[in-house]
């Protein structure tokens, strides 16, 4: 796990998603640890219609790799603003760049207090060590 990264400006969940907050919007994706555990990602199912909403702790999609299929769980509640359409044709962006080009959703945060329940990068790394 030594070569995996966990940017300090993000918040993390126990289900291995991350959130980057910018004003009242938040970008969501999966962590470097998650993509490493999954292996080569071959398919992702997201709510491609960005007029939907997501709720904290509720599934918003599926991700499939050569090893396994996993559910994607929303770290926060919000109204979807944008979906990363590039992932339809190139889901491997999640392996190559989980925090930048491999982002999944942008949402308008509807319950900012939920951010308090997420982990810092340091807390997330400690959580991973205890797994």
Image: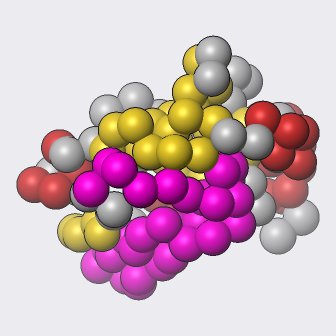
Residue 2 is covered by the magenta coloring: no
- Find residue 75 and report its horizontal and vertical position in percent: 67, 53
Image: 21 above or below 64: above
Q: Residue at x 27, y 56 (%)?
A: 49
Which quarter of the figure has residue 127?
bottom right
- Find residue 115 and report its horizontal and vertical position in percent: 80, 39
Q: 17 and 93: which one is in front? A: 17
Q: Is residue 15 left or right of residue 128?
A: left
Quarter of the image that includes the C terminus: bottom right
Q: 58 and 101: which one is in front? A: 58
Image: 50 above or below 71: above
Q: Is residue 36 left or right of residue 51?
A: right
Residue 34 visible? The answer is yes
Residue 55 is covered by the magenta coloring: yes
Q: Residue at x 22, y 68 (%)?
A: 42
Q: How many marks?
A: 0
Which quarter of the figure has residue 7?
top right
Q: Residue at x 82, y 45 (%)?
A: 114
Q: Is residue 82 left or right of residue 107?
A: left
- Find residue 69 and report its horizontal and vertical position in percent: 41, 82
Q: Which residues are magenta?
A: 49-77
Residue 31 visible? The answer is no
- Find residue 92 and report its horizontal and vertical position in percent: 24, 53
Q: Residue at x 89, y 64 (%)?
A: 130
């Amino acid at each position: 796990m030594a070569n995996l990264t966990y940017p300090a400006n993000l918040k993390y969940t126990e289900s291995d998603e991350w959130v980057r907050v910018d004003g009242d919007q938040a970008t969501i994706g999966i962590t470097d640890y998650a993509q490493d555990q999954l292996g080569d990602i071959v398919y992702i199912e997201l709510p491609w219609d960005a007029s939907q909403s997501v709720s904290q702790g509720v599934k918003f999609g599926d991700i499939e790799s050569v090893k396994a299929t996993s559910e994607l769980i929303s770290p926060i509640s919000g109204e979807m603003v944008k979906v990363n359409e590039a992932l339809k044709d190139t889901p491997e962006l999640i392996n190559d760049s989980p925090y930048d080009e491999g982002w999944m959703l942008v949402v308008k945060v509807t319950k900012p207090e939920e951010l308090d329940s997420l982990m810092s990068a340091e807390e997330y790394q400690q959580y991973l060590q205890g797994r």
